[in-house]
Amino acid sequence: MHFASDNTAPISPEILAAIEKASRDHAGSYGADALTEKLGTRARDIFGTELSIYPVGTGTAANALALATLVRPYGAVICAEEAHIATDECGAPEFFMGGAKVLTLPSVDGRILPMQIETAMARAVDGGIHHVLPEAVSITQATEWGTVYTPADIAELGAASRRRGLHLHMDGARFANALVQAGATPAELTWKSGVDVLSFGATKNGAMAAEAVIFFNPALAAGFERRRKRAGQLWSKMRFLSAQLLAYLENDLWLRNAAHANDMASALAGGLGSLPGVRLMQTVQANEVFVAMPDEMIEALLAGGAVFYRWIDMPGEPNPVVRLVTSFATRPEEVENFVSLARRLALANQEAA
Amino acid sequence: MHFASDNTAPISPEILAAIEKASRDHAGSYGADALTEKLGTRARDIFGTELSIYPVGTGTAANALALATLVRPYGAVICAEEAHIATDECGAPEFFMGGAKVLTLPSVDGRILPMQIETAMARAVDGGIHHVLPEAVSITQATEWGTVYTPADIAELGAASRRRGLHLHMDGARFANALVQAGATPAELTWKSGVDVLSFGATKNGAMAAEAVIFFNPALAAGFERRRKRAGQLWSKMRFLSAQLLAYLENDLWLRNAAHANDMASALAGGLGSLPGVRLMQTVQANEVFVAMPDEMIEALLAGGAVFYRWIDMPGEPNPVVRLVTSFATRPEEVENFVSLARRLALANQEAA
Amino acid sequence: MHFASDNTAPISPEILAAIEKASRDHAGSYGADALTEKLGTRARDIFGTELSIYPVGTGTAANALALATLVRPYGAVICAEEAHIATDECGAPEFFMGGAKVLTLPSVDGRILPMQIETAMARAVDGGIHHVLPEAVSITQATEWGTVYTPADIAELGAASRRRGLHLHMDGARFANALVQAGATPAELTWKSGVDVLSFGATKNGAMAAEAVIFFNPALAAGFERRRKRAGQLWSKMRFLSAQLLAYLENDLWLRNAAHANDMASALAGGLGSLPGVRLMQTVQANEVFVAMPDEMIEALLAGGAVFYRWIDMPGEPNPVVRLVTSFATRPEEVENFVSLARRLALANQEAA
Amino acid sequence: MHFASDNTAPISPEILAAIEKASRDHAGSYGADALTEKLGTRARDIFGTELSIYPVGTGTAANALALATLVRPYGAVICAEEAHIATDECGAPEFFMGGAKVLTLPSVDGRILPMQIETAMARAVDGGIHHVLPEAVSITQATEWGTVYTPADIAELGAASRRRGLHLHMDGARFANALVQAGATPAELTWKSGVDVLSFGATKNGAMAAEAVIFFNPALAAGFERRRKRAGQLWSKMRFLSAQLLAYLENDLWLRNAAHANDMASALAGGLGSLPGVRLMQTVQANEVFVAMPDEMIEALLAGGAVFYRWIDMPGEPNPVVRLVTSFATRPEEVENFVSLARRLALANQEAA
């Protein structure tokens, strides 16, 4: 019952096989190899547009490098207060942007609203040269609360950003999970809705360590290769990053993996949502379930072999909120066992009360 | 005939197998896994001392992160003018150190001398607060010219550094190649000779993408985990870095791979050194051979299927210098074919002259 | 009726005279002059302790340089959400700290509470290495709301900081105004209460351009001279900074100037506080008055020749809040004229209603 | 006999008077004042073109801020090895540029040649993305060796820079000294010859602390105000910077001061150049004289009350080289006394030999 994180999952077998295959002979280093070239072609097919794609090793690197291309050191990026770039990257964005600020907006379920961009910009402009000027908006898809922006949501944010001269960045650490949920094309969820740069995640959805920065506006990518190099993110044996990403995109592996993870999360939500004393905290739209439950129940589930994190205490909710994350590797019986154990505990609790 | 770089080689089969094995089940993320813990124990055994070891994805990251712990933004690091950190990392050290300087010293064969440290420090101190103050010395082992510092060389540099209050960093991208050449223990080549921090390379010698920063003075490692995180170098599925490094160190794989690469380089040097019109530029001590040869010969070798780089034009040498790099994957027949082709060309040249 | 800012005031005549006097002959550059040496002695007398004092040209430089010595690039500083370092320095702290974060705490009147430090630290520690770790607390004295921390307040913050291993920085852009209000000694308001580093302001209180960073713990000052140099804050003709600061401290000029400014603010507050339709927003303890008044009244005051800024709209307060700042140069008749004009307008408003 | 530096001189009386005059009343802060506006107009008149001018407090700040606008963090600036930005600013350029590199070129007398730019660029491009790419050239006018580029020299450097897509920066800490020597117009010495940005110095030539960054291509100035603010270089009482610069430019004060300083240096050179045992090291074109003389003579001059620095030991020159700097405040009798003392010592030396 592994629900701690999609990062605890193994490598998707297809991706492991691709690494092995890429290792059968010599190949050019630092990206001068056939797989890296093929990745570009494949990505252009999938997104249906001209683009530049740059593989890197981690999601934090993808985000921080992307933001550094959009925001000058005396600028800022606007995002939700829960955004990974604001809370979970130990200042990587500030480091890569050369000291620019990450300005956060309150959010109910991880999503921000176009109106908030307007307000934040008005305040910043009002501060004149004493205040950093935002140059980009960053949204997370799927969000840190496991919710998903629709193409229409993004298009509105894109329009609000453009009106204020802001670039739009998408942290797509769980892009595939959002994509299968949204029922949209990759293009609709990104550049057609105004996204300039995408941090395209694969690690959480089956890769070993492989993310990519995708520029839909190649002009923004000027100088990116040097940025990546000086960030220590240019792999000498680059083909092993490209091989992972190619296998990820081959035969819809990324979509199948994400759909499975989402289904497992839905099953968890379905099974837990109606239990007495248990409260679902959000509409489950991707592979994360946030659920409030009594302390004794949490302890008993952990004692019963489930692996997951207590997440947060929320105002107005008496019980702690835990986070359950599913992945491509989650087995249906893990979900069944967890739900059935939770049900037994909830009913026992109820009787005791 | 692959002599372009040790970076063009595949993954050592033992390391690939270790990745596969590590992928059989779930494991804690961000380093909270059994393999990462085991790596620490293994490294302490091999170096025979207490130490802190932190895996990262690239050699540039290892170097830049190591230097950032040793040098404050208003300081500097001293190194040879050919040093990778000075010329081939697109400013990564400056980026990670927050703007500190990389001060270079002239060098004949990639090695610097204790006396040069003294001179550089005297000059810096003379500049007072208008001049950056060096806080570290960085040496490359094996050097960029394929030469190797002996333990005695390093001990002298270590002593000169300590006298001036400088830390000593070793860029060990090819540490194993130097080790088997030096006939010394890992301890003798590092902390026993005054090295404070080692960039321990594995990628060039058989890994997919795996390096490590090793602190022999754990006090220096304070804060390193946050530094690594904010540099985007903390892999979420860290065990796949640790698995590579463990397999690398298991059953002397690292030593066997390096010894083979060095032998192949010696064979190249032996075969080429005595050819008419060809001149060996350095004492071959690791897995790189620098050799001057006529332009027509270079062209003919490339046309004959050999892969290698023209490296540099050297003062006093009429012919261009090419670099030949061997690796664990170099087959003896590649060397034989290359030497025999070179011999035919050299003799034909001689007759024509 | 100049109430826009204490920055719009001229130079105190005594300070101007000191600049003129320092210009009568040659003197050593970059701080190697008699005035700079004398400043150190004078500062040690006034604060009654060993200390290091470094003049710089602006308050933003003083704050940013001070914080950079206390916080490493992967750390953070905690402050009130209104803090100048958070909102009005265009990211200077982030720039000088090498990308470290400024974490803000909500505050009612510009002051933060010891408990808030505890909470912020708990949250940061909980985030582990994914979260920046605060290394300093910064408080503003007097605060951005014109309120003043008592020595007891500071001592509690100092103790809370030390418990958590945090340094305590004081932004004393209006330190003299706070000092005369607190009725304490400079020592009591700083190092005796746990302040490690003080940004000591003089510009707002009569200097032309002169601030100083004062370290009560000289060990923290290691390397500061190089930091200042590389920040472009080491004046070649340093004596003209030192001369300003010496004259400022001579014959209690700083205290007299501040007392006058505070008195003028009190007179404003006394005169405005009881007017119908006008509401004082804070206890006036220094040289700033925040007062809510109807839009028509603001317009009429501005039309009547008063110079001041609309500051903010506050929740629960129907009228806009304006800021009135007094200085050493404020003349009593300016205050009288302003109050009497305001009174006429308020009474007319009342009748109309 | 003050020849240590032009930084040891007092404030020009006209500039001191301007500060006093600017202090007679209140004025808008942060540059919203009449003097700052007037400075822009005056600068445009003098340079005969549209431009943006931004006063700052120090020359290091002017240079570092200028370079930060021209060079991205993954880029580099090319300059002579003696350049102030390379050796005497304690890494300020690297700090402000966000880690970009300062690449130095050898130089005989402080001047670089167009050909060197070409060579440096060829080498940089050859390194590909592993090497920082220069984005600017910086020249010092007058140079650190007291020599002066002619308009033709600059035009050639400007053309070589443009051919390679490089911006051209001029460190004009002693711009006025160069200008009166070159016998050219300010326009000819800058934008007409391809200079994009000028660090315009006044402190060494009579100001208290006042320099300016002048953009001849206003497009390059985008965002500069925020850069200056976050560098702690935006004076709140900005008018006192502008007042200095206006007085400096008024009634040709800058030219008169510089001409006097240059004349004093010529007199020194004329008097010293023919003395036995003394050797002039450069063609004196501005206000610095570099001269080699025996150790005993140096000691005797210092003992006789002269103030100056030993500068450097030069290859091929048996005696140490000292630097003598004159300024607007140098009195002819200081020069006469120095020369006559030197003559006595030289002749005595000669007899003794």
Image: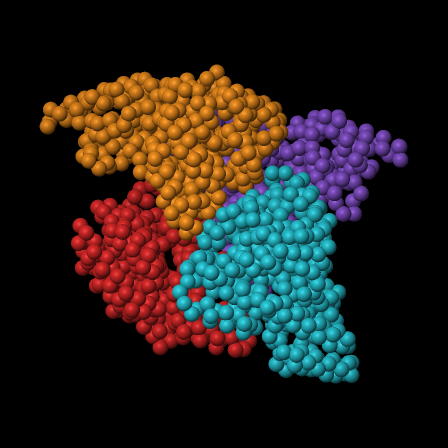
Chain colours: A purple, B orange, C cyan, D red
Q: Nearer the viewer, residue C318 or C37?
A: C37
- In the image, taking residue D343 as reference, residue C264 lies left or right, namely right
Residue at 36 percent across and 54 percent down: it is D84
- In the image, taking residue D314 as reference, residue B231 lies left or right, namely right
Residue at 23 percent across and 23 percent down: it is B273
Report the quarter where the N terminus of chain A lies: top right
In the displayed structure, D46 sits above or below C71; it is below
In the displayed structure, D194 sits above or below A23; it is below
Q: Position of residue B332 (x, y in %)?
A: 32, 17
Q: Nearer the viewer, residue A143 or A74?
A: A74
Residue at 30 percent across and 63 percent down: it is D287
In the displayed structure, D227 sits above or below A306; it is below
In the displayed structure, C261 sits above or below B50; it is below
Residue placed farthest to the top in the image? B251
Q: Position of residue C325 (x, y in %)?
A: 64, 71
Q: Position of residue A113 (x, y in %)?
A: 64, 54
Residue at 34 percent across and 37 percent down: it is B116
